[in-house]
Amino acid sequence: MKLKIGMSQMRCEKGDWEGNLRRTEELMEEAAAQGCEVVIFPEMGLSGYCFDEHYRDAARSLDSPEVQHFVDLTAQYGVAASGGFIEANSEDKPFVTQMLAQYGRVIGVYRKVQIVDEEAELFSPGTEMPVFKLPVGGEELTCALAICADSDRPDLFARFAGQGARVVFHSSAPGLYTRRTDETSWRAGYDWYKSHLGERLPTYARDNRLAIAVATQCGATVDEDFPGGSFVFGRDGSCLACTKDYGEALLVYELDVPE
């Protein structure tokens, strides 16, 4: 099976659903024009990476108009797409959620399992590790979603593979702890995240015979910077494609997914 994937490395302003949806549509349209069947957007790419009380009104439910708009875009452009947002949770703290939609319907929802210690008071961890059946070219592709710090969970990728997943779509938004002020500091941020994933995901891919495709937030938001870094790792652990730097980009790669 051939699978053409677009990885949207984009700037996502915090709390700006309208602006982020607009940019998401532009990139989805560009990906569709290049023949992509799947488009991956970053962690919290729709809501922006909202993590304190100033942005609590940015949380949305799965049935909100904004989330439905994203789902509708997949019908308009004839693609499958993974979109991320802060999901309202009536019973506890919100979830960090990534959804997979295709042709105007929701294929699946994944809530981030690995919540780092510094955010444990802000977000509820997910408890399920599902895989999804994605119709592609007359076949069904078993795939999974992962989010950012999940890259520290080799057991999660092994669990996906054990359930038959052949591809994991990984969405990230790792915040940089100091503001970037020049080319050198931005490059250092990108190189850090490239190295961070390079020490982990190739091993998971090779050990579990998985392909892993990554899309990451980039650029400066109102109070935090993000490094970019979008990649495709093959089932042998090799890096098949990557963005050249920290700038906004649509990385397109046609992946050969063995039967």
Image (cartoon, rainbow, N blue to C red):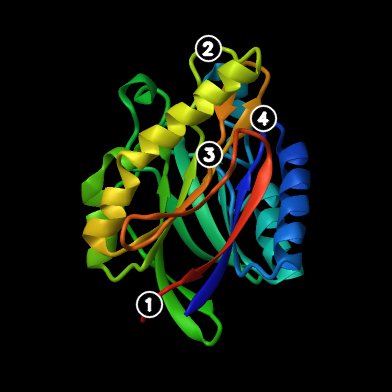
Q: CA distance from mark 2 to mark 1?
A: 42 Å
As shown in the figure, which amino acid type bears the numbered disc 2? Thr
Picture residue at 27% right of the left edge, 52% below the top: 204
As shown in the figure, which amino acid type bears the numbered disc 4? Gly
Q: CA distance from mark 3 to mark 2?
A: 17 Å
Residue 22 appears anywhere in the view: yes
- Give percent across and percent down for residue 76: 76, 67
Q: Does the residue at mark 3 contact the one at mark 2 (Cβ under 8 Å)? A: no
Kindly report which numbered mark, 3 or 4, lies closer to the viewer in this rendering: 3
Kindly report which numbered mark, 2 or 1, lies closer to the viewer in this rendering: 1
Residue named by callout 2:
178
Mark sitting earlier along the chain (3/4): 4
Q: Quadrant of residue 137?
A: bottom right
The image quadrant where one finds the C terminus is bottom left
As shown in the figure, which amino acid type bears the numbered disc 3? Gly
Q: Secondary structure at mark 3?
A: loop
Describe residue 28's horizontal placement relative to residue 148 as left or right: right
Q: Does the residue at mark 1 contact the one at mark 4 (Cβ under 8 Å)? A: no
Q: Does the residue at mark 1 contact the one at mark 3 (Cβ under 8 Å)? A: no
Q: Quadrant of residue 73?
A: bottom right
Picture residue at 37% right of the left edge, 33% below the top: 196
Q: CA distance from mark 2 to mark 4?
A: 21 Å
Residue named by callout 4:
15
Residue named by callout 3:
229
Residue named by callout 1:
258
- Give percent across and percent down for residue 15: 67, 30
- Give percent across and percent down for residue 116: 33, 28
Q: Does the residue at mark 2 contact the one at mark 4 (Cβ under 8 Å)? A: no
